[in-house]
Image (cartoon, rainbow, N blue to C red):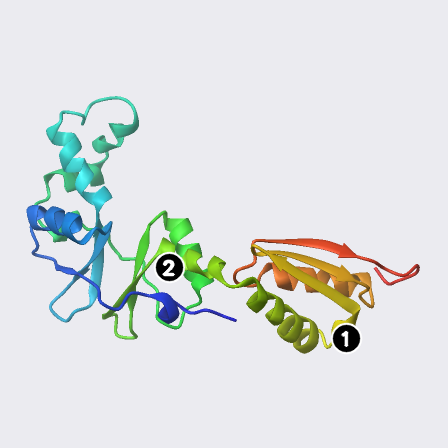
Amino acid sequence: MNARVADVMAKDVVAVRASASFKEIAARLREQRVSAFPVLDADNKVIGVVSEADLLPKEAREAGYEGHPGPLSGIRHRSEQHKATAVTAAGLMSRPPVTVRPHDLLSHAAHLMYDHQVRCLPVVDMGGRLAGMISRADVLGVFGRPDEEIRREIIDTVIVTQFLADPARFTVTVADGVVTLGGVPETAVVGRQVASAVQHMEGVIAVREEFTYFPGAAT
């Protein structure tokens, strides 16, 4: 299984135009119960993302924290000062937007979210137009795969198809996403390679190796 962004993304997405006001954005974020909106130009291309975090500098500034030491001292940074005085999405949004395509792997989306510390990503087509939105919860949904589905993929796709190994040499159990691999692989190398492949499967939380090797098995 190689889940793609298109498999889990939300297609009915609320977006705002660059001219949307601070007040409108704040109200719609609250109404829609989302953390961010993609910002679109006249051709419906995603040109930025405006999030709750982008609105906070204004609140901090109005509360008198711009010169206050501590976690909010970042308000002094030039970009934050600009956002603190911005009144529309054009000035508030983060740009360039970090986006994914519908056919990108979920693992790619997860890496982008982690690297950029964002909660969601706009999904765009080849022309850069909005196609959907994917959130952290969507990405983490792969860990809800049924244990039996994971077990069957390990046997059919990894052991039999990928390594051309005899499945009778292996025992595979999966409980709450934790895979236990046992049996007698032909060599230690094969055993390690199978375990590594399983570790990178979607929905696998951890892999426990309990293989037995005959004396003299290649390492």
Q: Contact (CB < 8 A) between labels 2 and 1?
A: no
Secondary structure beneath label 2: helix
Question: Foreground: 43 or 205?
Answer: 205
Residue at x 64% of width, y 64% of height:
197
Q: In the rendered picture of this protein, how many numbered marks are placed on residues?
A: 2
Q: Where is residue 30 in the image (x, y as percent from the top left)?
A: 16, 47
Q: On the image, numbered disc 1 is attached to which residue?
A: 166
Which circle marks residue 138 in the picture?
2
Tell me the quadrant of the picture where the C terminus can be found: bottom right
Q: Position of residue 200 (x, y in %)?
A: 58, 61
Q: Position of residue 174 (x, y in %)?
A: 62, 59
Identify residue type, mark 1.
Answer: Asp
Identify residue type, mark 2.
Answer: Asp
Q: Where is residue 40 in the image (x, y as percent from the top left)?
A: 16, 63
Residue at x 56% of width, y 58% of height:
204
Task: Find the distance from the CA under tag 2 to the CA under tag 1.
Answer: 36 Å
Q: In which quarter of the image is residue 112?
A: bottom left
Residue at x 10% of width, y 48% of height:
27
Q: In which quarter of the image is residue 77?
A: top left
- In-image side of 72 versus 101 (left or right): left
